[in-house]
Image (cartoon, grey):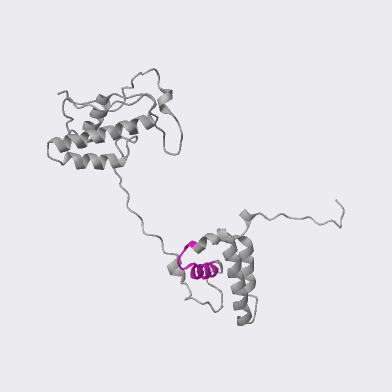
Amino acid sequence: MEANEKTIKLEYNTEREKLKMPEYGRYILQMVEQLRDIPDKVARTRQAYAVIKSMERLNPAVKQDEHWEQKLWDHLFIIADFDLDVDSPYPLPKRDQMDTKPMAIPLKKRPVKATHYGRNIESIIDLIASEPEGEQKTAMIRQLAIYMRQQYLIWNKDSVADETIFQDIEKLSDYRIRVPEGLTLSRISSDTSFARPGLNLDFGQQRRGGQQRRGGFQRKNKR
């Protein structure tokens, strides 16, 4: 290499200062830093409005918020690390307000007993278990069983016996529900298809010659 040739050192983002608002990019950060070098506050404020316009173009989704203009000005001060002397049309944000962590949403810790049915099924089962015995409760059990059979076939490509669904209902209810003797479900047409959410699969055409899959829970006690 000749003596007069200069070595160019590449600078990677991983070696640079971490962006406080990555959605606006490093050029906006540089523009904000240059604002501080403008000695006249009026000119500095006028240039701040120009930076806000650039931020608006880079983050058009912000307009979906009700107070999007104020949000842009808040973002400007966050990028400036709250060290920017300009006349904002909105109250200046405070650092402690921006550093407040969002309130944690309590989640149910109890694991789902049967993931292919989902957690809502357990809530429905609890509701049915509290119903008094009678025709209405039997009708509710039958409709629940039909829905559970459909959910079962979405995630299991085989057919399923009514008895398997009935066993699952009793097991998931901790045997607070007893499926009435003689209860049957409507037959499923051979060309009926069930598909997982987001997919377009015809499970009806993928059956294995009518072979039944004996999945689900086993009944503790025989009637």
The number of callouts visible is 0
Query: Residue drawn 32% across and 26% down?
Result: 188
Front residue of this view, candidates 184 and 171: 184
Res 198 quadrant in image: top left
Q: Is residue 134 visible?
A: yes
Front residue of this view, candidates 103 and 2: 103
Q: Quadrant of the C terminus?
A: top left
11 vs 49, left or right, is: right
Q: Position of residue 25 (x, y in %)?
A: 60, 60
**Would you say the magenta stretch is mainly helix, strand or loop?**
helix
Question: Is residue 3 part of the magenta span, yes or no?
Answer: no
Q: Position of residue 7 (x, y in %)?
A: 79, 55
Q: Is residue 176 visible?
A: no
35 vs 94, left or right, is: right
Query: Residue drawn 58% across and 65% down?
Result: 55
Q: Position of residue 205 (x, y in %)?
A: 43, 24
Query: Residue drawn 47% across and 69% down?
Result: 95
Q: Position of residue 41 (x, y in %)?
A: 60, 81
109 vs 64, left or right, is: left
Which residues are drawn in magenta? 64-78
Query: Residue drawn 31% across and 35% down?
Result: 114
Res 85 quadrant in image: bottom right
Front residue of this view, candidates 4 and 129: 129
Res 136 quadrant in image: top left
Residue at the extreme left of the image, as rendered: 133
